[in-house]
Amino acid sequence: MGTGKIKVLVVDDSALMRTMLGDILQSDPRIDVISTARDGRDAIDKIKTLRPDVVTMDVEMPNMSGIQALEEIMKTCPVPVVMVSSITHEGAEVTLKALSLGCVDFIAKPSGAYMPDINKVGQEIIEKVIAASTAKVKPYKASGFSQPSFSSSFNLNNLNLGGVSRRRDIVAIASSTGGPMALSDLIPKLPKNFPVPIVITQHMPKEFTPSFAKRLDSASQVEVVEGFDGLTLKAGRVVIAQGGSHLTFKRRNGVAVCALSDAPPVLSVKPAANVMFLSVADEFGGNVLCVILTGMGRDGTDGALALKRKGAHVIAESQKTCVVYGMPKAAVDAGVVDEILPLNEIPDAIVRCVKQ
């Protein structure tokens, strides 16, 4: 008879780490660690027999690495996977590879295999595992990270405006869990001649945002860069918020530029979409298109409310395509959303809204 708890399989080649992670997860009454595995092959066998709700997966393991196992898991027996490894703290490319293969989220192990260190991130591990248990996962297929997916259907001169008449001077996007893959699908579909700047807050550590921006840039027709102090906002430029800094904006000689903020986290995240949205509202008023994509929590809702009050148009990703329907749901529940759209319809809606 089921317990109603989230069934978790912990995969790590270190017996000590398996015990530590298991103890942390088991400390939450909502979670039941049903088993552990010592490598990727062991994990695949146990996934097929035990049917866990969530898997935590180390990256570097003998016999079959976490990345190799993840690819096979997502092809043959998809299940929400949270990558947990020291290599994710240093190796952004490995983490982005895991995300492109379909892992739901990731967390870096603390340096050193000592209980006091790992307990510092214990609550984050618990929260991400719980969020992952609600995630929608699909069989793996080639990702937009590795191949451009330009759309021939987006032509700024051939679009029906559909009644959207207010000028939009900037697009502001928020995303979290599932966001890297959503953005890798959305941004490459925008046309090269996109007429306004785009700013994005994706919840991601500072070690990962430079590589993420580069990967997205290589797959897109628009320019994608990581934000830095003084970077000019311009048409066709997509700015990704630096991990560990809030992305804000100011005017310099009448031109909008980026201004990074070291203010404390908001709703436990930094960068925070709320901070970015509020700054956009200050600098651009209501001439803004606001988009809230997949993610856990409610970051973005307060900022979207401020934008909406000034006349901004707000789009939320629908539950149908969200990996985690948290951030969009919070905005919808707050009554600030104008359109709820599946991810595949959002690029067209963005282009429609900024057509001038």
Image: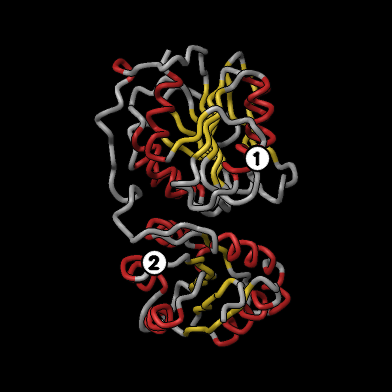
Please report the residue visible at 50 percent of the width from the left and 80 percent of the height from the top.
Answer: 12
Q: How far apart are marks 1 and 2 (CA)?
A: 34 Å
Q: Is mark 2 on a helix, strand or loop?
A: loop
Q: Quadrant of the N terminus?
A: bottom right
Query: 115 and 277: which one is in front?
Result: 277
Q: Please, is residue 210 above or below residue 140 in the view?
A: above
Q: In which quarter of the image is the C terminus?
A: top left
Q: Mark yes or no: residue 199 visible.
A: no
Query: 268 and 117: which one is in front?
Result: 268
Query: 268 and 161: which one is in front?
Result: 161
Q: Please, is residue 146 above or below residue 44 in the view?
A: above
Q: Name the residue under label 1.
A: 246
Q: How crowded is mark 2: few (under 14 residues within 10 Å), some or many (20 or more)?
A: many
Residue lying farthest bottom?
15
Please report the residue visible at 29 percent of the width from the left and 42 percent of the height from the top.
Answer: 148
Q: What element carries label 1?
A: strand
Residue 78 disc label: 2
Query: 63 and 183: which one is in front?
Result: 183
Residue 292 appears at what percent x and percent y? Answer: 55, 38
Residue 203 appears at what percent x and percent y? Answer: 58, 48
* Relative to 30, 65 lies left or right: left
Residue 222 appears at what percent x and percent y? Answer: 37, 31
Residue 103 disc label: none
Residue type at numbered disc 2: Pro
| Mark before the other along the chain sequence, 1 or 2 | 2
Residue type at numbered disc 1: His
Please report the residue visible at 64 percent of the width from the left and 62 percent of the height from the top.
Answer: 127
Residue 298 appears at what percent x and percent y? Answer: 65, 45
